[in-house]
Image (tube, coloured by chain):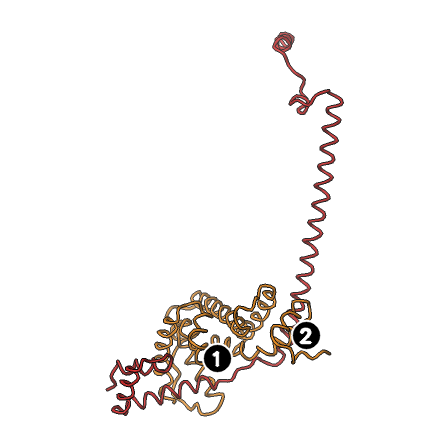
Amino acid sequence: MINQEMYDLLIRSMNDQLTAGEDMQLQQALKESSELRDEKIKLNNIGKLLSSRDHSFSAGFHSRVMLAVSDEKKGKVISMDFTRSFTTMFNRIAVAGVVVIVLLVISLYISHGSLNVNTFTGVDPVSQDNLVSVLLYEK
Amino acid sequence: MRDYTSYNDSELIEKAKHGEDAAFGELVSRYEQQVAGTVKGMLGDNAAAEDVGQETFIRFYRSLEKFRGDSALGTYITRIAINLSLNEIKKQKKVISLFYSRDDEEKEYDVPEERNYDDESGTKELVDKALRALKPEFRSVVVLRMLQGYSTKEAASILNVPAGTILSRLARAQKELKKILGPFV
């Protein structure tokens, strides 16, 4: 039966630096237990098995990546062009709009002689007398 | 055609930033195998791993401008590969849970049956099955530490977890792997 504490220590020794005391304890346990030694061999073999695993992508992977990158680049250029032209177009429209507004204000001022709310709304000032006469006429 | 093999990674990145695709191609050649090891370790040897591998390089290409060289390029690319692999696993799990019951889902991560795994493809299959039997958070640690050979500190930085977490996950993963691979080693 393997001492669980020693087994945990054995696993830790494979991934981390043990303290001198822990290392001595583990070495002693390894000397005394053949089962623990077997475990160590097994764990080492598992490590070797995993690290020996050689991986590569299928043929043509590199070309596929470069093609995707090229598409990505084209997409980037198109979107950059769109953003740029959109900004330019927006600026032109905004400037033209401001010019039109200024011209309208000037023409209103010239035709009405002032720039009060009635001028902008196009409603003539209504006095109380006018209102009464309108109501009487309606009647 | 210009030979880029003599340039170091930083020089190649600068050239790629300035639109030299062949420089980026050289970086792909240099890190292709490392990315393959990471994504195939995480996802197995299948089409999804190929797609994630490709996506890793595309994401890297997109982030070229942001890469400041704080970490080694290999570590940076591996971080992208691991994150995309973990996302892919989540996606696959969602699909599995949509179409299968929980029992079926668990069956997918079954331990390999005892048969002859002596040949190279058999060994590869055995390791793949053993890795797939691990939970993704343990698998990522095994892939980084045992397959890719990163240090605990590097693995912690890639996965953005404390070094202690890496060590505890690794210990648990090794115990699991011993249970699965024990009869074959």
Element type at mark 1: loop
What is the quadrant of residue A100 in the picture?
A: top right
Supply the letter of whichever chain is orange. B
- Chain of the residue under the numbered disc 1 shown in the image: B
Q: What residue appears at the point 58 percent right and 63 percent down from the top-left corner? A: B66
Looking at the picture, does residue A101 appear above or below residue B147?
above
Element type at mark 2: helix
Looking at the picture, does residue A119 appear above or below residue B14?
above
Q: Which mark is residue A72?
A: none
Q: What residue appears at the point 57 percent right and 79 percent down from the top-left corner? A: A57
Kindly report the distance in space between the C-alpha atoms of the residues bearing marks 1 and 2.
Answer: 26 Å
Look at chain A in the picture and name its colour. red
Q: Are marks 1 and 2 in contact (CB under 8 Å)?
A: no
In the image, B2 versus B102, the foreground residue is: B2
What is the quadrant of residue B160 in the picture?
A: bottom left
Q: Residue B33, percent across and down?
A: 55, 80
In the picture, the quarter occupied by the C terminus of chain B is: bottom left
In the image, B107 versus A79, the foreground residue is: A79
Q: Residue beneath label 1, please?
A: B148
In the image, B75 versus B34, the foreground residue is: B75
Q: Residue beneath label 2, please?
A: B22
